[in-house]
Amino acid sequence: MPGKRARRHFSQLSEFERGLIIGMKTAGWSMRLAASHVDRLEKTTRREDRRIVRQALVDLTVTRSTIRADVGVAIVPQTISRHLAEANLKSKRPFRALPLTPEHRQLRLQWCKARSMWNVTDWQKVVFSDESRFVLGTDDNRVWVWRRPGERYNSPHTVLRHTGRTAGVMVWRAIAYDSRSNLIVMRGTLTDQRYVDDILRPHVGPFLNGFPGAIFQQDNARPHTARVAQDFLLHFQTLQWPSQSPDLSPVEHVWDQLKWQMPSCDSVHDLEMAV
């Protein structure tokens, strides 16, 4: 019976069970193994499993504690995470609402109006560029939400927070209508000088020189707007970019799709090869 089963989950451990668990933990057993040994392993029915998944799909901002309260079974957050992972629900950093001021909105509107008459031929000349960070695992000290691959999340609400730092690589690429640059994979931080020495001079320059009429696009990240980078790009035609406008760049969507196709990697070297 459901009621009897629920009471089983919430019932207290006996002194004998508590002693057994303490002894097994002292001997190095995992909590899951110890709980299984005393028949206290958390289990859920198929109906409860479906309810866990449905809660995450209906409300993308739902927390694991809220899911547990709704299901009505005393299960740990890791159990909920495992069920969601089995349903192909993964964690993803939320795309927060852009902090647009009235000035930002006006500049974005002006930028779009100035190019509202551009045709396919005009856009074929634009070379979009961007870099993104790929990390080992899912923990890179950011906020994540549950979602299915390919879905976007546009709410400013936060759901789960992971702490700590995870090793990873910085990846850069430029794409045009029917061509693309080399994929640049680097470790460490992208500084102003490194952006010029490792990306602009050896890759962007030759790529643009071989592309008649090319218009180079980059966002307003600090290495891009640095004087040393701007001095190098004086020899090329560039596309003015409005602030707070990652949604206007197709490269952002390329990174999003690529990250969902990435396999699990155990080392930074494997991560580089996978990218």
Image (cartoon, rainbow, N blue to C red):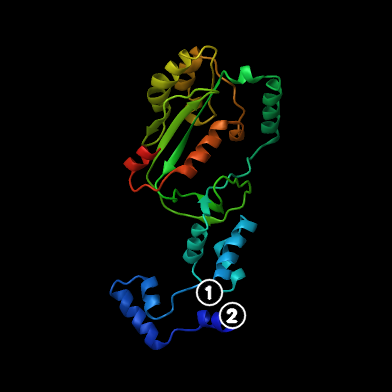
Q: Secondary structure at mark 1?
A: loop
The extreme left residue here reads 27
Whichever of labels 2 and 1 marks the residue nearer the N terminus, that label is 2
Q: Of the residues shown, which amino acid type is indicated by label 2?
A: Pro
| Viewer-nearest residue: 29 or 165 | 29
Query: Disc 2 versus disc 1: distance between alpha carbons?
Result: 13 Å
What residue is shown at x 61% (from left), y 33% (from top)?
245
Tell me which amino acid carries mark 1: Ala
> Total marks drawn?
2
Q: Using the image as rendered, state which of residue 254 and residue 115 is in the foreground.
A: 254
Q: Is residue 88 above or below residue 13?
A: above
Instruction: In the rendered view, tell whether residue 206 sits above or below residue 137.
Output: above
Residue toward you, 83 or 25? 83
The label on residue 74 is: 1
94 up-or-down from 202: above or below: below
Out of 245 and 225, give the one closest to the viewer: 245
Q: SS at mark 2?
A: helix
- Depth check, mark 2 against mark 1: the one in front is 2
**Quadrant showing the N terminus:** bottom right
The residue that mark 2 highlights is 2
Residue 227: percent from left, percent from top: 47, 21
